[in-house]
Image (spheres, rainbow, N blue to C red):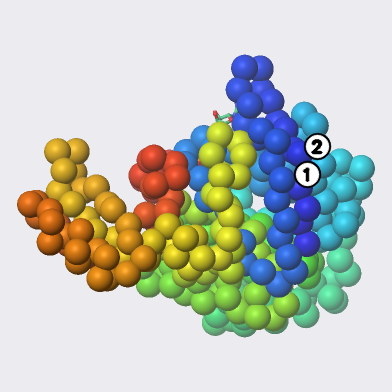
Amino acid sequence: MIKIENLFKKYKNITAVNGLNLEVRKQEIYGFLGPNGAGKTTTIRILSTLTLPTSGSARINGHDVLKNPVQAKKEIGVIHQTRNIDPELTGYENLLIHGLLFKMKIKDIKKKADELLDFVDLKGDMHRLASKYSGGMRRRLTIARALIHSPNLLIMDEPTAGLDAVARRRVWGLIKRIRDRGGTIFLTTHYIEEAEYLSDRVGILDKGGLIAEGAPSKLVNDMGKIAVDIEGSDGLEAEFFETRGEAAEFLSKLNKNAVIRRANLEDVFIRLTGRRVNPAANQNK
Ligand code: ATP
């Protein structure tokens, strides 16, 4: 569904995307992870035809975003971090306007809007002003809006940033259902547990290039699925082992406070990038 080959994006003295190669299969949820400034948003902007790459190619379902941007754009629904819904319109009107932008027939838009508002559980609120919606309702409306023209690929930049735990889980449910109905999802998130729960595969980006890729469970197993957290002078440090037995043996020789636990994708992320992700750094975007 997505094929990115040798992609570069350079701004004056910054290389935001640095020879990126990446493929996303049909009906896959692909989590695109990376520390602040790794190049995720730039890649998403190139895929959604908002930014021109310096060189290389990106294709969506076979359509080159540079040579055939109109076709490529029809393939995707995008949920950006910043572009929000119109609070002066009702949820229903927000969808109608968006359908018109895609030059859909009004009869088809109404039918699709009805179906999608039902899908995101906003049918009962469709004629209320979007300004009266909660954060979670707004986010679900942006998902419905991105699906109005029946795209094959949904690109989501931080789909749950700023939502509370309950609203976040509701969005997770929607994302899985979109995939189960045949959709493909490419998402970025700073919440690594979100990527671990949702993604069939993740790609970890650093300094504009992929440094790891695979199913979350495979990446964790490759590192060592058992972690030992040790209290160090800089806070907690972790060591990784294949089995609990090996971890226990290590622990028995250690003269420090330590805890054995299952390793997770965040451990892989920190190990590879050497940094902790900071969701708070992204809230004000
Ligand atoms: P975050 O997690 O903070 O959203 P990101 O992975 O999405 O980060 P990008 O926003 O793609 O990263 O930025 C990659 C690099 O390119 C950063 O160093 C950023 O400062 C730089 N950059 C992005 N857009 C521009 C621009 N329009 N002009 C100059 N530099 C830019």
Is residue 37 depicted above or below 156 in this figure? Answer: above
Q: Is residue 130 visible?
A: no
In the visual, does 156 lie left or right of 150? left
Q: Nearer the viewer, residue 222 or 107?
A: 222
Kind of residue sitting beneath label 1:
Glu
- Residue 167 visible within the image: yes
Ligand 1's quadrant is: top right
Mark 1 and mark 2 lie on one chain; the one further toward the N terminus is 1
> Contact (CB < 8 A) between labels 1 and 2?
yes
Report the residue marked by disc 2: 56
Label 2 CB, ligand 1: below 8 Å?
no
Percent coordinates x, y for residue 15 in the rendering: 63, 26
Q: Is residue 217 left or right of residue 50?
A: left
SS category of the residue bearing label 1: strand
Screen quadrant of the N terminus: bottom right
Q: Secondary structure at mark 2?
A: strand
Write down the residue under mark 1.
5
Decide which of 105, 186 is in the foreground and name it. Answer: 186
Residue occupying the point 36% across, 65% down? 242
